[in-house]
Image (cartoon, helix red, strand yellow):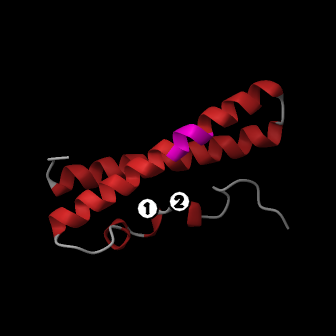
Amino acid sequence: MNLPVPDLVSQRSMLVILIAACSTARTAFEAADNAVDAELCADLNRMIERSEAELEKLNRAIDERSGGGTGQDQAGPAADVRSRPGLDGPDVG
C-alpha cells in the first residue's frame, strides 16, 4: 500500500462502516432463522472476516507511515466495531 495516510484513513473508515453494516445485517438475519438467511449469514461472516483482516493491514500501514502507535488510537472508538453493543450478534441476558 503506497497511498498517503489520509487515503489509508479514508479506506479504513469505509471498512469500519462495512463491518458495522455487515454485523448489523447478520444480527437481523440470524434472528430470522431460516435456510436462506443461514447461507446469507455465512456470506456475511466471510465478508466480516475479510474486512477485519484488511482493517488490520490498513492499521499497520497507517502506523508505519505515521511513525508508530497502534492505529486504534488514531481511528477512535469506532474502529473496533466489535466493542460496540449489538454488533456482535444478539445480546443475551
Residue 21 position within the rendered picture, expressed as x and y whole percent measured from the top left: 55, 44
Residue under the image location 57 percent in, 42 percent down: 22
Residue 69 position within the rendered picture, expressed as x and y whole percent measured from the top left: 28, 75
For residue 81, which numbered disc appears in the image? Answer: 2
Residue under the image location 27 percent in, 55 percent down: 9
Image side of residue 92 versus residue 16, left or right: right
Q: How crowded is mark 1: few (under 14 residues within 10 Å), some or many (20 or more)?
A: many
Mark 1 secondary-structure assignment: helix
47 within the magenta span: yes
Residue 75 position within the rendered picture, expressed as x and y whole percent measured from the top left: 35, 65
Q: Is residue 73 above or below residue 6?
A: below
* Residues at marks 2 and 1 touching, judged by CB atoms closer than 8 Å: yes
Residue under the image location 67 percent in, 42 percent down: 26
Decide if residue 89 is in sight here: yes
Q: How crowded is mark 2: few (under 14 residues within 10 Å), some or many (20 or more)?
A: some
Image side of residue 47 versus residue 59, left or right: right
For residue 30, which numbered disc appears in the image? Answer: none
Decide if residue 17 is in sight here: no
Residue under the image location 54 percent in, 50 percent down: 20
**Residue 36 in which image quadrant:** top right
Extent of the magenta region: 45-49
Q: In this view, does 38 lie above or below 69?
A: above
What main secondary structure does the magenta stretch of the protein show? helix
Q: Name the residue under label 1.
A: 79
Query: Depth check: 31 or 51 in front?
Result: 51
Quarter of the figure with the C terminus: bottom right
